Image (cartoon, rainbow, N blue to C red):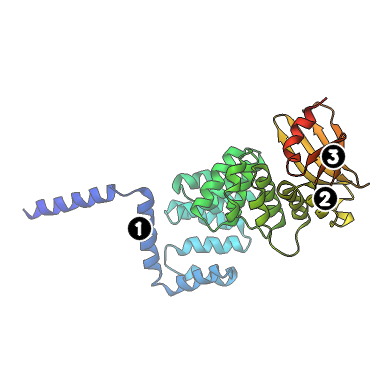
Amino acid sequence: MKLLVVFATCLLLILACGGKTTQQKQADRNLALLQESTADPDFAKGRALVMEEKYAEALPILEKSAAPEALFYRALALQGMGKADDAAGLFAVCIQNNIQPAESLYNIGLIAYEKGDKESAAARMTDVIAKEPDHAGAHYFLAGVAYEKNDMATAETHFRAAAKSSPRNGAAWEGLFYALVSQDKFAEGWELRDKLDLTAGDDLANILLVGEKIGKAAEALALIPAGEMADAVKLQRIVLIAQIQGLAAALAEADKLPKELTAQAGFTVLDRGAEGTLEWLVSKMDDGKVMLTCTAGKEAKPALHELAVTAAGVTVNKKNYPADTFRAAIPGLCKKK
């Protein structure tokens, strides 16, 4: 009877282990290693020094430690000291001994990348994700590789996974935003505005541009903080004002811009839009004229119309349009022969 009980107990243990995912087993193993290692003062001190990036101090202390995990931190110390080949060798031993296998693969990938072997680095990152599907660093790396290749769909997938696994990683959200808008997924990009660092001029200017494209001019304008603005934000702000308050208000804002900001282009964009293949642009030229430029398609020659703008309305081709209806009338005006 005793043997039967022992056999039944072992069977239950086997079934319990079999019910765990590989990731759960790995987490349990790492926890056991950590609990074992915390009793080792050399490991605890060496690991702390690595975390403080005091690699040269950490290495001899970790070499005295008997904790299995010390091998991984020795590799990190060597990597931090610029001894890439030695570090890669120790990371490989870590993988063989199932010590932080995913992180070891990840660091081998980084070392390959630093040596200029991008293909090997990408392959290692793919291996990392096979072991740890939610690894934020590997996803971010592969997203960057795809972005460089202009493979925005793949970049989107990996940036999204990186942001999900590491929500505080602002770079992952930023990458996802640009991958989305590069695919003309403007509405999805707009939904990320709270995830972006809008104190950065380029990011703010681009989210304002997205707001313009999807008809969220008022909401976009509200994102602009008080105080000094980047040049790109100043220019984009004028377009938003045109959409909300009309051309006269946009023209007044354009007149406040320093001359050097628009000197190279020779004009300031006041408003713009598109309808089908038609694209139009309202701009203030350096000579003070306000022009409407209509382009029916890529191969079509632009048509130019000079505008007279007042607070009451806009006059073009001797016809006056009320200020609040002129923008809606532009596509029809452009299509007239």
Residue indicated by mark 3: 315
Distance in Å between CA atoms under marks 1 and 2: 65 Å
Distance in Å between CA atoms under marks 1 and 3: 75 Å
Identify which residue is drawn at 54% across, 54% down.
89
Tag 1 and tag 2, C-beta contact below 8 Å? no
Secondary structure category for the residue under label 2: helix
Secondary structure category for the residue under label 3: strand
**Can you give x and y, in whole percent of width and height, for residue 120 in the image?**
59, 43
Q: Outermost residue, left direction?
A: 1
Residue indicated by mark 1: 28
> Who comes first in sequence, dot 1 or dot 3?
1
Of tags 2 and 3, the one toward the viewer is 3
Q: Residues within 10 Å of mark 2 (few under 14, many from 20)?
A: many
Of tags 1 and 3, the one toward the viewer is 3
From the viewer's perspective, is residue 17 above or below residue 53? above
**Left-right relation of 193 to 134:** right
**Can you give x and y, in whole percent of width and height, for residue 310 in the image?**
83, 47
Judging depth in this view, the residue of 312 and 21 nearest the camera is 312
Identify which residue is drawn at 44% across, 51% down.
96
Residue indicated by mark 2: 251
Secondary structure category for the residue under label 1: helix
Tag 1 and tag 3, C-beta contact below 8 Å? no
Quarter of the C terminus within the rendering: top right
> Who comes first in sequence, dot 1 or dot 2?
1
Q: Outermost residue, right direction?
A: 287
Distance in Å between CA atoms under marks 2 and 3: 15 Å
Q: Residues within 10 Å of mark 3 (few under 14, many from 20)?
A: some
Q: Amino acid at mark 1?
A: Asp
**Can you give x and y, in whole percent of width and height, for residue 152 in the image?**
62, 39
